Image (tube, rainbow, N blue to C red):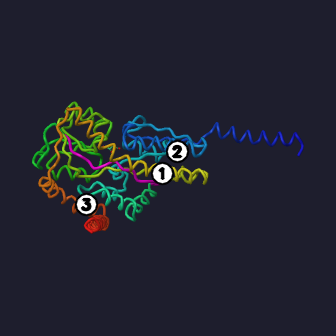
Amino acid sequence: MKLSSLLIGLCALCGVALTQAADPIVINFSHVVAPDTPKGKAALRFKQLAEERTNGRVKVEVYPNSQLYKDREELEALQLGAVQMLAPSFAKFGPLGVREFEVYDLPYIFPNKETLYRVMDGEIGKGLLKKLESKGLIGLAYWDNGFKQMSANKPLKIVADFKGLKMRIQSSKVLEAQMQALGANPQVMAFSEVYTALQQGVVDGTENPISNLYTQKMHEVQKYLTISDHGYLGYAVITNKKFWEDLPADIRSTLEQAMQEVTKYEREIAQKENDEALAAVRAGKTTEIYILPDKERLAWQKALLPVHTQFESVVGKDLIYGIYNIAAQVEKERKK
Ligand code: LMR
């Protein structure tokens, strides 16, 4: 080969390299929680793996703490292509029109994490992610946070303690019904507004896994916390369908692989983050912690279980009974 054509060839290669270096594929990953939460840490781990494994062909920009968008806005932004990745909690999918997702919000439907993982990773969970496609979205993974606990400025021990309390909820009809079943007055509010609303007394209390309570400093404005594990909060990692399908195939599969690894990591740290947050709340001494005893838990369950029946026609009886069956199976195996 002549020297000149070799040089031309090399320059062409340099050109490709330069274009790639200059124009990485950008994934804006927006979320509403703090960076030091299970979701926040996993988003950063995804950034690291995605950038490393694609040799910089992909750049992930993570925007935590509702910096870019609040709950509802971020879903609209994703559909419009203004951001490329989110991990909203399940409750946020109802208002999008995928009401079946609210099955995850039913109080006391998951007796333990084993049942939850079998549901999420099995046919039910996969089927729910598939439903997102009709909204122009692709569900890439399920991430964990933990069971939710109740907090307020008065002790929450028996069901009657909820009477008339203004409780902040995520935008979910199931959560609305849950608070009503307890006698409380549910108030839908974006996550980013909860701290101020609690501080100013716009609402009296709220529910969240402790990692969220602690990292938003809600414990500083909540005198009482009840460890009730009455519901679950997890996430679906989602992307814009068109964006995802237009990615070069090798990049897409590298990102899918990275997402699988991050999901494993995320689920490993979720419980730990919540345990550490509980210890930190305890050490902070701002909040009295009450562990709901079994007897009272049964009374809470009795008040809350009618919500399952109430939502059979919305989320689907099959789905609810499918989860009951998995829970029974897990219980059976545990007894062996
Ligand atoms: C909430 O709004 O309470 C949660 O969904 C926040 C989150 O994403 O964990």
Q: Report the amino acid beneath label 2.
A: Leu
Could you tell me which secondary element the residue under label 1 belongs to?
A: helix
CA–CA distance between discs 2 and 3? 40 Å
Magenta part of the protein: which range?
138-151
Q: Is residue 97 magenta?
A: no
Quarter residue 200 falls in: top left
Q: Are marks 2 and 1 in contact (CB under 8 Å)?
A: yes
Residue 311 tag number = 3
The residue that label 2 is drawn on is 49
Measuring from the top left, give residue 123's x and y in whole percent: 40, 65
Q: Report the amino acid beneath label 3.
A: Phe
Q: Residues within 10 Å of mark 1 (few under 14, many from 20)?
A: some
Give the mark nearer the N terminus: 1 vs 3.
1
Give the mark nearer the N terminus: 2 vs 1.
2
Q: Are marks 2 and 3 in contact (CB under 8 Å)?
A: no
- Of 255 and 205, the residue lying toward us: 255
Q: Which residue is found at the position 27% from the left and 69% from the top?
A: 336
Measuring from the top left, give residue 175's x and y in whole percent: 25, 51
Q: Chief secondary structure of the magenta span?
A: strand
Could you tell me which secondary element the residue under label 2 belongs to?
A: helix
Residue 261 tag number = 1
